[in-house]
Image (cartoon, helix red, strand yellow):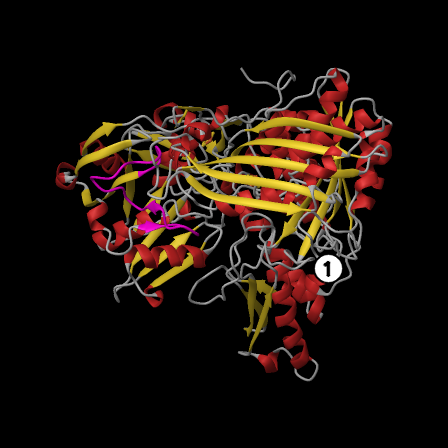
Amino acid sequence: MFTINLNGTTYRAEEDMNLLDFLRDEARVTSVKNGCSEGACGACTVLVEGQAVRACLLTAAKASGKKIMTVEGLSKKEKEAYVWAFAEAGAVQCGFCIPGMIISAKALLDKTPDPSVGEIKEAIRNNICRCTGYVKIERAIGLAAGVLRGEMQLMAPAREGIGSSLPRVDAREKVLGTGQYVGDMHIEGMLYGAVLRTKYPRALVKRIDVSAARAHPGVEAALTAEDVPGERYWGFISKDWPALVAAGEETRYVGDALALVAARSGKAARQALELIEVDYEELEPVTTTVFALSEGAPKIHPKGNLLSTTRISRGNAVEALAKSAYAVTHRYFTPATEHAFLEPESALAVPQRDGGLTMHVGSQSVYEDQRGIMSILGLPREKVRVLGKLVGGAFGGKEDLSVQHHAALLAMRAGKAVKLTLRRQESILVHPKRHAMEIEMTTACDDGGRLTAIIASIIADTGAYASLGAPVLERACTHVSGPYHVPNADIAGWAVYTNNPPAGAFRGFGVPEVCFACETNMDLLAEKVGISSWEIRYRNALESGMTMAIGQIADPDTAFKETLLAVKDSYEMNHFGGIACSIKNTGLGVGVPDTGRVKIEVRNGKVLVLTSAACVGQGLATILTQVVNETTGLPAERIEVGPPDTFLTPDAGTTTASRQTLFTGEAARRAALRLLEDLNHSSLTQLEGKEYLGEYTGHTDPLHSGKPNPVNHVAFSYATQVVLLDDDGRLKKVIAAHDLGRVINPAAVEGQIEGGIAMGLGYALREKFLLEKGIPKTRFGALGLLRSSDMPEVEVILIGKNTKPLAYGAKGVGEIATIPTAPAVASAYHRYDGKVRFSLPLADTPYQTK
Ligand code: FES
Ligand code: FES
């Protein structure tokens, strides 16, 4: 028996166990998050006798008799100080790291009430945040310190409408840990799911026997492929991914599921997995694209190993190259990377009396989840209700089904609620990654440095399953020419299946990879011409009315040149400065149906905004509040945004392609305009119960429409980033100038850019996803994610001249924030030591991990 003094209340643990498991599962204190279970993320930080400690590294025995505090135990004054400070600074995004951050902050402020920035950075260096880039978190801690010293008031200036930094509407619940992620949910009598995965990336599965697992006293269901009632194969575009691999089939990667178990405890579920017998014939995995495309290579899928091909041609690149004054040709390699969202995947499936199912998920689209589950379970739409909970980060890694279908299958078989939460190592194993790419690129120009042609070939390792590999390759091909006017282009790309983990959507969707090649070539071409890296970009910058390599005419509101001008001095006047630019589409485009939808209801004297669009941390509810506030003039506190629900909220598509602010924002504006018509002659009270629908569809042309100047995307954002190094070759500052159209919430946009830069710096300098024969050989703590102490100063310059009415002129920011960072870092090191680097992460920098 162990005694745990938690926030002033005494709990008892009958047996010794991990302290984090005790806090979450026994004491049900769920502000303490489980991001890794291995001491590497800091999401579980608690105070033990006043010291910030990671609970997952402690046991009940070691904590016995000691005073433990979580955010629930803060004084009222402290709670209000942190809520205000984090909201005011715009420091909250997905929120999963925040309670742990606050505990680390409290440990600091209790001892050092007026800390320096360096002391704040040091205090939170064991707390990983994948969303914010730490900049605003550090500011928030400074603000909270000011309040706690009594030097600042909890006053916020009135902020309303477009262009104001309205504080996040979900800040309070995320700071105090009262907001629910799926993993925080508990239903009395629920079961715990677990998944048996293949031992080998490629093996013939000869036999799977779950009889001993079924006989385990704690087990209520054990399933194999035979138990899938509907269509066993699923996928976003190509249905090539089995929910469970059947005996007689080959596995394709180490995340493949062979059997599922639901038991009355997590421990029993894990024990049952050990009892499952599998006979394999291990086969040589196909782990390189070269092998996959070679004559006689084993076929990973019946159609072969080529998922997709993309070709883009404009003018005559070969002829133009021959006539060009200068040209550079290089081969680039970019690695697979892990999203490392802080919240591992979790789903809770609850069977209903009518034979249906209610799912609680934390994904990028409740409707995509519903479609997948309907198909795998063979259930009609009205029997599958999917509700969205808070999402602890996604970055593209929560588009595919990962746990949802398995929880659903188990719950339907067991007839009881089943929660399936991945441990961090399993999460790393299972979900699709950023594509590893090999890019060969030629860039040519005339003697004045004006681009004449590009020729590029891109080979993408798309891993075991299609996921979104084909459109990722397509975006890589459409963006490899960068934000420049290139009259002649010859671009070809291939997405190739291997037995590596699948590759799919990841912030930037193929563009960070090719931006590294495009921008490094621009630097090298500038050297040949004898002009600066800034100058060559300026001479070739896309302007309104110019034609892109895909044929689309740049919009009248294009402000790319303004981003270059904004950083000119920072680049030219700093000896160790690097520069890179990028372009990124907003929305799915290329003729794919793309619609945002919103329903506004007047309920209880308030305006309720309903949409399925997921907030994955970017702050969509706040943006929609501002759009409705601006359109109707109703105060922000009369507007609420409800959670996604396939039974109640209209389908606004997936949170992907930087699309929600524009698409769902515009849908909200249209719904709000209808409400405004009524408000012109009625009070809100008189409109009680009324509903207003808003819908916006972006109509675009397919990639090969045959039109000379198609509209492939409704909008493009542009950016120029400059990275400065100090004399020791360490990061000193990043200056980021972004053309994002009209900015709806400057603090939110800055937060996206700062977080995107942190991710881009990690991609440039340190992030690794090591594979050995198709098997991931990395743990969360070894991914190389940037810590607060690694982050340089960031200066964000927002340039918005878009005057279109669509969503008040907003364009996407989520992805472009991260795209130019890695090549800007490479450019800086090139100036620093004269070496050109053709692979990521960059070699020979002070940031390498052993
Ligand atoms: S869960 Fe404890 S450090 Fe990550
Ligand atoms: S807000 Fe820090 S991980 Fe998302």
Residue 415 image position (x, y, % from top left): 22, 55
- Establish if 220 lies above or below 706: above
Residue 441 image position (x, y, % from top left): 64, 32
Q: Is residue 168 magenta?
A: no
Tell me where residue 3 sits by quadrant.
top left
Q: Is residue 673 left or right of residue 739?
A: left
Under circle 1, the secondary element is helix
Q: Is residue 270 left or right of residue 103?
A: left
Quadrant location of the N terminus in the rendered image: top left
Q: Which residues are magenta?
A: 233-256
Tell me where residue 229 sits by quadrant.
bottom left
Residue 93 image position (x, y, % from top left): 59, 45
Q: Decide: few, some or many residues near mark 1? Use Cα within 10 Å; few <14, some 14-19, many ≥20.
A: many
Asked if one can make out residue 80 in the rendered structure from this viewpoint, the answer is no
Whether ligand 2 has any atom under 8 Å from the Cβ at mark 1 is answered as no
Question: Which amino acid lies under the numbered mark 1 shown in the image of this protein?
Answer: Gly
- Magenta region's main secondary structure? loop
Tell me where residue 56 sits by quadrant.
top left
- Which one is nearer the viewer's eye here, 714 or 807? 714
Q: Is residue 241 magenta?
A: yes
What residue is at 70 percent from the left and 49 percent from the top? 717
- Which one is nearer the viewer's eye here, 29 or 757? 757
Residue 456 image position (x, y, % from top left): 62, 36
- Which one is nearer the viewer's eye here, 310 or 594? 310
Asked if one can make out residue 251 in the rendered structure from this viewpoint, the answer is yes
Q: Which residue is mark 1?
A: 809
**Residue extending farthest bottom:** 681
What residue is at 43 percent from the left and 27 percent from the top? 38
- Which one is nearer the viewer's eye here, 158 or 754? 754
